[in-house]
Image: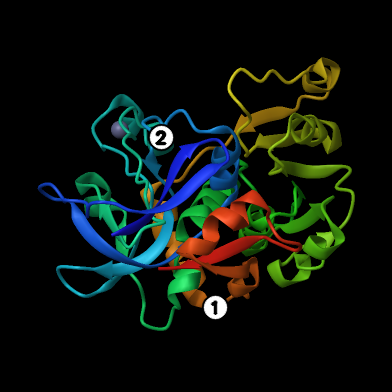
Amino acid sequence: MRAARFHGPGDLRVEDVPDPRPGPGDVLVQVDVALTDGTDLKAYRRGHPLLLSKLPSLFGHEFCGTEVATGRRVVAANSAPCGTCAACGRGEEAQCENLLPLLNGAYAELLVVPARIAGTNLLPVPRSLSSEVAALMEPLACCLHGVERAEVREGQTVAVLGAGPIGLMLCACIADAGARPVLVGGRAQRRALGPDFGAEPGDGAGADVAIEATGTAKGWRDAVTLVRRGGTAVAFSGLPARTEVPLDARRIHYEELTLRGAFHHTPRTVRAALAFLASGARPWEKLLTHEVSLDGLPGLFAEPPDGYLKAIVRL
Ligand SMILES: [Zn+2]
């Protein structure tokens, strides 16, 4: 099969590789479309200790495809909790001690969905939903989980820092929870999409909750800076290993801020995300700004085009 493989930072090659062979319980999928995402771009630039540990490595995790054995159209999340560890027992499935191995290799004609994921987080795609939009399930599931972690309540004002695809999807989830998302910062071209996802522009000062989706230490600090007294700041995006972020101790103590992390998704938010996409409540397709063939993918990562949010990779 043809597949894009990561050979090292900045070195992605489209190659002929042996077809993957599914083990017991694994599900073989013929990939129809894959989507690029921010994590992939970060990993392309600097590598990734978990996803790309053995080189060359298959790459990509957002996809929609056809289950080879049944012919049905499916999407899958990139992991599934084990259901038996202590974290799963506490209902903290994003903290499952056995999340690995993650699904990886969506930028390829064929993809193996590991047995655990196939059993929990592989879902059939509703007929009315396009494959391109269905492939947004995993990042949207992360956003729904993030909004749960933020404990957003009806009527609250929620600042979202970062106007990338994640920031926009967070806004849609916040609006759906009955709160008021305010999109802070970002390029004008991206901010212009805010209203489509329920957001209004603003500086976010005094928000009840601030959710950071910038991928920068500054974003984390800004979230702590701009929430109201007694407010909640949520660190949604991951920073490079060993990053330390200085935070305003005075605010956190005297003004009783709550600081929370949000990572990944749960089987419940995975299902909810697919339903949210299928609802047609938002023009999700506007997040898919570009389209490339597999051969065009290395060039896209090397030089993301103007106005790029996410790209459809057609297999
Ligand atoms: Zn577990």
Q: Residue at x 26, y 62 (%)?
A: 29
| Three-letter amino acid code of the residue under disc 1 | Gly
Quickly name the residue at label 1: 280
Q: Please, is residue 165 above or below residue 204 in the view? A: below
The quadrant the N terminus occupies is: bottom left
Query: What residue is shown at x 35% (from left), y 28% (from top)?
Result: 87
Q: Position of residue 97 (x, y in %)?
A: 33, 27
Q: Dot 2 corresponds to which residue?
A: 92
**Ligand 1 visible in quadrant:** top left
In the image, farthest residue toward the left:
24
Which comes before the other along the chain, label 2 or label 1? Answer: 2
Q: In the figure, 72 relative to 24: above or below? A: below
Residue 120 in the image: state x and y as whole percent.
Answer: 27, 51
Outermost residue, bottom side: 128
How many numbered badges does the structure rendering display?
2
Some atom of ligand 1 lies within 8 Å of the CB belonging to the residue at label 1 = no
| Amino acid type for the residue under numbered disc 2 | Glu
Percent position (x, y) of residue 80?
A: 32, 44
Residue at the location (73% across, 21% down)?
Answer: 245
Q: Residues within 10 Å of mark 2 (few under 14, many from 20)?
A: some
**Quarter of the figure with residue 209:** top right
Q: Please determine whether, in this image, residue 250 is positioned above or below residue 2.
A: above
* Res 200 quadrant in image: bottom right
